Image (cartoon, grey):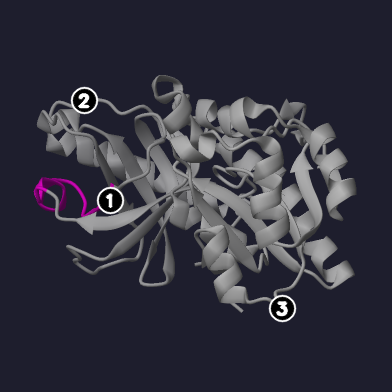
Amino acid sequence: MPLEVLHSSEEWRMRLGNARPRTAVTIGNFDGVHLGHQKILRGVVERAREMNLMSAVLTFYPHPARVLRPEHAPSLLATLRQRLAAFDALGIDAAMVLQFDAALAKVTAEDFVRRFLVRAMCARVVLVGANFRFGHRGAGGVELLTQIGKDRGFEVESIEPLVKDGVLVSSTAIRQALHDGRVADARHMLGRPFALAGEIQPGTGQGRKLVVPTLNLMTLQETLPKKGVYATEAVVGGKIYRAVTNVGVRPTFDGANLAIESHLFDFAETLAEGPLEVRFWERLRDEQKFAGPEELRAQVLKDIETAKSYFARPGNLESRVEA
């Protein structure tokens, strides 16, 4: 069954009815759905199967920091649609997506549990990260949640943060890795390549005529990798193509606007629209300005061979995510 997505406690009760199942549930923003998040989400699915419960996520949109501290709000790694797709892929049954606004920010910790976890979601077990905070001004934590659970009939499990290769896996660390162009490090923390999703948009045509044909991505995602050239995969029409992608301003053509251009290997179609996803595997080089199109084309052909060599090496596709 596909993920059920609901947007309020009222809709949850209405759609699932008075005889709605009890849940194993987790709460959070889950930006990027990295390996640390996946550890919690898989725990939810496991508890649900063990205890014959519905697996559920309670999440928020927009990110609470956009409302509480907009000047310090992080750029997001993923869209809401991507987060929900990740929940679905991990086997979560249902998600409640609450609109985070000033009114929700004022809900006390106790009232938050009563309204959402108890009355609506019928929580039986709640899994949260060890540093989890909730309620007005973040007054609630794991200890308070556990105390309330004893009175309200649900268990609480605290999940320790994930450390991988000596690095604490977090959305903040992944943002920094992408800012630095370290897409391989981001991939190790995400458990899959960082992906930009959006729509194909028409380009200027200069690349196709003077260099190599490309597909141009328009995305609403906020966090982009550092400007440069990358070995990537592009998903078009449900098929995966290896590619080379440039993130930058096209300085050889005196460009000013940021563009995300991908040359797909063994792809001959000319497309001006449609969905496109680009997955970043390895950084190849900085973006640079060349004397002209011929010099740029020669470098791009070298980039293509470098990317093909990268993908040909054993073990370099261990985190492949199928379309």
Quarter of the rendering containing residue 136:
top right
Q: Name the amino acid, label 3.
A: Ala
Q: What residue type is labelled 2?
A: Lys
Which residue shows up at 60% across the image and 59% down it? 87
Residue 47 relative to residue 240: left or right: right
**Does 52 appear in magenta?**
no
165 to the left or right of 282:
right
Q: What element carries label 2?
A: loop
Nearer mark to the viewer, of 3 and 1: 3
Q: Name the residue under label 1.
A: 217
Location of residue 165 in the rendering, given as x and y in whole percent from the top left corner: 76, 31
The magenta-colored residue range is 204-218
Residue at image location 55% in from the left, 44% down from the top:
32
Mark 1 Cα within 10 Å, few/some/many (few <14, many 20+)? many
Q: Residue 19 carries which label?
A: 3
Q: Distance from label 2 to label 1 (Cα)?
A: 21 Å
Task: Decide: is 270 above or below 156.
Answer: below
Kindly state the secondary structure of the residue where label 3 is placed: loop
Helix, strand, or loop for circle 1? Answer: strand
Q: Residues within 10 Å of mark 2 (few under 14, many from 20)?
A: some
- Residue 158 versus residue 202 in the image, above or below: above
Which class describes the residues within 10 Å of circle 3: few (<14), some (14-19), or many (20+)?
few
Distance between mark 2 and mark 3 Cα atoms:
64 Å
For image coordinates 63% across by 77% down, the residue present is 17
Nearer to the camera, 281 or 198: 198
Q: 223 or 252: nearer the eye? A: 223
Residue at 61% x, 44% y: name it: 190
Mark 2 or mark 1: whose residue is earlier in sequence? 1
| Mark-to-mark CA distance, 3 and 1 | 46 Å
- Identify the residue under disc 2: 289
Q: Is mark 2 in CB contact (under 8 Å) with mark 1?
A: no
